[in-house]
Structure formats: structure tokens, C-alpha cells
Image: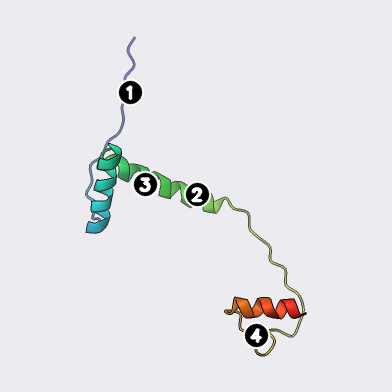
Amino acid sequence: MSLAICHSIMRTTVRLDESLLREAKSYASQTGRTLTGVIEDALREALARRHEHRERPQIQLHTFKGTGLQPGIDLDDSAALWDLMDTR
């Protein structure tokens, strides 16, 4: 009895940014791999990360009553916020 394993291989055209293609070809050469292998692995990795993001549990943020942001508080100035919290 013989067992035949058949992989489906498709050819397609993909347009890549020139600098990205150069970098991918260089990486393939440095690692002794084919350009196709590098692109396949990168695509698999990107798709796997997409699924990881979906599996994260939703975080419930708690809010508290108050009068809102105090005058003179700049939320973009983390150093000033730390100073303000240290003085209270």
C-alpha cells in the first residue's frame, strides 16, 4: 500500500514595496531560506497574532463619581501628574 501526500500549491502575484522585498530577500539569503518560505512564515505569524488579539478577555474599567478634570491638569504631562499625586 502506498501513501501519497499532496500539498496544494498555488501561484499568485503579490505587489510588495521595493524596500520590503529587498529586506525579505536579504533575510531569506542570510537564513538560507527561500523568499517564499520567509513570506509564508511572516503571513502565518501575522494571522496568528490576529487570532491572539481576539482571544483576550474584555477589561471592565471602573469609573467613579466626581466633578471631572480639575482646572490646570494636563493629562499629557505625566511628570506633572506624578508631582500632583505626590503632594496629595
Give the label on residue 73, or none: 4
Rendered image: mark on residue 51: 2
Q: Name the kind of residue labelled 1 in the image.
A: Ile
Q: Earlier in the sequence, mark 1 or mark 2?
A: 1
Q: Residues within 10 Å of mark 4 (few under 14, many from 20)?
A: few
Q: Image point 23% across, 46% down: which residue?
A: 12
Residue pointed to by mark 3: 42
Residue 3 percent coordinates (x, y): 34, 16
Distance Cα–Cα, label 1 vs label 3: 25 Å
On-image quarter of the N terminus: top left
Q: Which residue is mark 1?
A: 5
Q: Amino acid at mark 2?
A: His
Q: CA distance from mark 2 to mark 4?
A: 39 Å
Decide if residue 44 is on the left or right side of residue 17.
right
Quarter holding the C terminus is bottom right
Q: How many marks?
A: 4
